[in-house]
Image: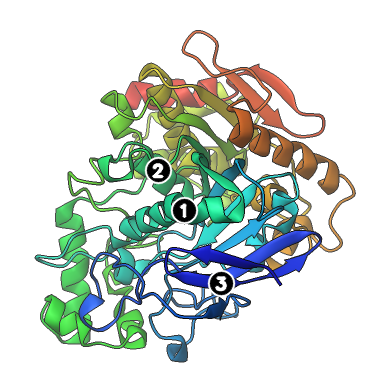
Amino acid sequence: MTVVVTSAGKIRGTSRDQIACFRGIPFAAPPEGPLRFRPPAPPAPWDGVRDTLAFGAAPPQLAPAPGAPAIWRPGDGLDCLTANVWTPDPGAAGLPVMVWIYGGMWKHGSARMPQYDATALAGAGVVVVTFNYRVGFEGFGHLPGIPDNRGLRDQIAALQWVQDNIAAFGGDNANVTVFGQSAGAASAVLLASAPAARGLFRRVIAQSIPAGARTRAEAHAATTAIAEAAGLPATWDALASLPPEALLAVQDAPLRGPEDGFTAFGPVVDDDLVTGQPWTAFEAGVGGDVDLICGFTHEEYRGQGPVPAAKDIDLGQVTEAVGLGKDAAAAYREGYPGLSDNALFTEVLSDALVRMPTTRVAQAHTRAGGRTWLYDFTWQGPALGAAHGIDVPFTFGNPNTRYAALFLGSPPPADFAGLSERLRTAWTSFARTGDPGWPRFTPDQPTTRIWNLPPTDTAYPLEASRQIWERTDPA
């Protein structure tokens, strides 16, 4: 077993496949008691050698879907702010570092999920860090007099821990790449322009960036609904008195009315960490000093919601619902001739949820002077096609988890290994040198990597959608 000295004390990990792994390292104090709903505080130091052989508890959350296994149980409590490190050589110096931020609609997720095992990724010669951050109301609920965006503040605390400690694991704290998917991708982009995170990393890989920032008024309305459902005043004292499971029981109260949606939670525009949607700060010229890969899966809506039968689709109502207006239905039919209304439904929702927010981030970042690379992951899985989240197994090289089986089937297709190796090579090359191996995306040359076998590079593939959305500009 390998022993490493961290800023809080010595830890002992395990090894597998020549990769040393340390699990459940505290990077902040448990957010309980007087620290409940507060920004993260430093962890308490310990004497002797602490075994870091098991993942820490997940942050409080409900199961992601009916019948899905619960990743958090009431007995797990609130002691969730832990990190995990995989390193090919703890005795090395100067290895590139990759820090993962999980997705989950701001209300689900944990670094202990098997799909985030980083053994294969670290085998490419990088140090990989995963960590937990608070989700749902614990991480993003708004309370009077309490700093917003505790989940993002947890992420910054983890990145500061990386700065202070990663050299002990063989990593270079001056060469840190943050990568994440969905809510994790949006987090990474927001942190790229946040003053509090400045200098903590130099590169970002953002896989499927959604919109999702909430105004203070929206966040206040959500808190009011939750407090009313709990029969309590909307104050820190009252809501902090609830055990996590009691808060979770009413956490979705804001979604039981006309505002029904995926989640009531997300980054709150506090004019401190968050100034608007993920692209806003880039549009203002901030964050161009951070290198950026960003992209989307080609059918982002798949896996996020049902596709109605063709007879039940009114495409004009769909385009109006996403803020484009009914007339945009005709523009979609003209831009994508030959597609059925079912297929157009998926195009519109994929654009609204992820493809256009990600495109807007790429455009804003390159206009801010940043080095930007864009991709479209088009590889089709047997069950859900090029669905939201299908890229995660390829990123980590883990085809045999329950999560991967949703997209890949079991056993996985024969071409999984080849595409996964190519994607991981691009990501680790970017982390190491700042070059993923395909041409940059610029206003004059909007080159886009198409992730399939074989990978190809082409002009931006969603020009029809981009023009529709730029004409309307619902944001």
Residue positioned 45% across, 80% down in the render: 47
Considering depth in this image, is 9 or 347 the residue closer to the camera?
Answer: 9
Considering depth in this image, is 351 or 163 the residue closer to the camera?
Answer: 163
Q: Nearer the viewer, mark 2 or mark 3?
A: 3
Q: Which mark is residue 424?
A: none
Q: How many marks?
A: 3
Name the residue at the top extreme: 444
> N-terminal of the two: label 2 or label 3?
3
Residue 162 x, y percent position in the rendering = 46, 53
Residue 9 x, y percent position in the rendering = 47, 71
Mark pair 2, 3: CA separation? 23 Å
> N-terminal of the two: label 1 or label 3?
3
Instruction: Confirm or deny contact between disc 1 and disc 2 (CB under 8 A).
Output: yes
Q: Nearer the viewer, mark 1 or mark 3?
A: 3
* Residue 227 relative to residue 426: left or right: left
Q: Which mark is residue 11?
A: 3
Q: Which mark is residue 200?
A: 2
Return the residue at label 1. Answer: 162
Mark pair 1, 2: CA separation? 8 Å
Name the residue at the right extreme: 414
> N-terminal of the two: label 1 or label 2?
1
Residue positioned 66% across, 26% down in the render: 449
Residue positioned 50% across, 24% down in the render: 372
Q: Is residue 87 above or below residue 134?
A: above
Q: Amino acid at mark 1?
A: Val
